[in-house]
Amino acid sequence: MATIHRYEVPVDGAWHDLELGGDVLHVAARRPETVELWALAGLYPPRRRSFRAFGTGHDIPAAGQLAHRGTALAPGGLVWHLMERNP
């Protein structure tokens, strides 16, 4: 049986590892300093996945090796783009 779980990725210029057992369903930001993602859990054995939030206009190193998982509009007009490394 699958469930949906919520995870947070701080907007701090660092990669953050999360243990996910399913697909990312949605990305949002209710606070300017954090991107949230909702993902299915229980479909597959959990595996470590690495995420980072980038702002519009910010440099994205090795962009061709990353997967875009969603864009979030944060309070105050900021826009964050959640990328996954080595998907």
Image (cartoon, grey):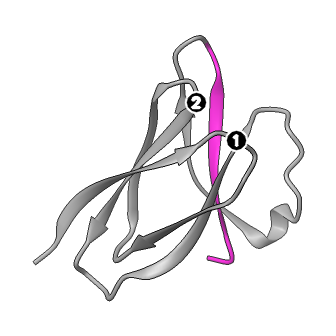
Q: Residue at x 72, y 53 (%)?
A: 14
Disc 1 is placed on an element classified as loop
In this rendered view, identify the residue nearer to me: 2 or 9: 9
Between the C-alphas of marks 1 and 2, the distance is 8 Å
Q: How many marks?
A: 2
Dominant secondary-structure state across the stretch colored magenta? strand
Whether 45 is drawn above or below 61: the answer is below
Residue that badge 1 annotates? 12
Q: Residue furthest bottom?
A: 45
Three-letter residue code for mark 2: Glu
Quadrant into which the C terminus falls: bottom right
**Disc 1 and disc 2 in contact, CB within 8 angstroms:** yes
Check disc 2 and report its element: helix, strand or loop.
loop
Query: Residue 63, position in %: x, y?
Result: 83, 61
Q: Is residue 40 left or right of residue 20?
A: left
Query: Amino acid under label 1?
Result: Asp
**Given the current orientation, which residue lies at the most extreme top position?**
76
- Position of 44 compared to 27: left or right? left
Point out residue 42 in the picture as x, y percentages from the top left corner: 22, 78
Query: What span is colored magenta in the figure?
Result: 77-87
Mark 2 = which residue? 33
The quarter of the image holding the N terminus is bottom left
On screen, residue 82 versus residue 12, left or right, reads left
What residue sits 64% from the left and 35% below the top?
80
Q: Residues within 10 Å of mark 2 (few under 14, many from 20)?
A: some
Q: In the image, is residue 57 part of the stretch drawn in magenta?
A: no
**Residue 26 image offset from top left, x and y in percent:** 39, 48
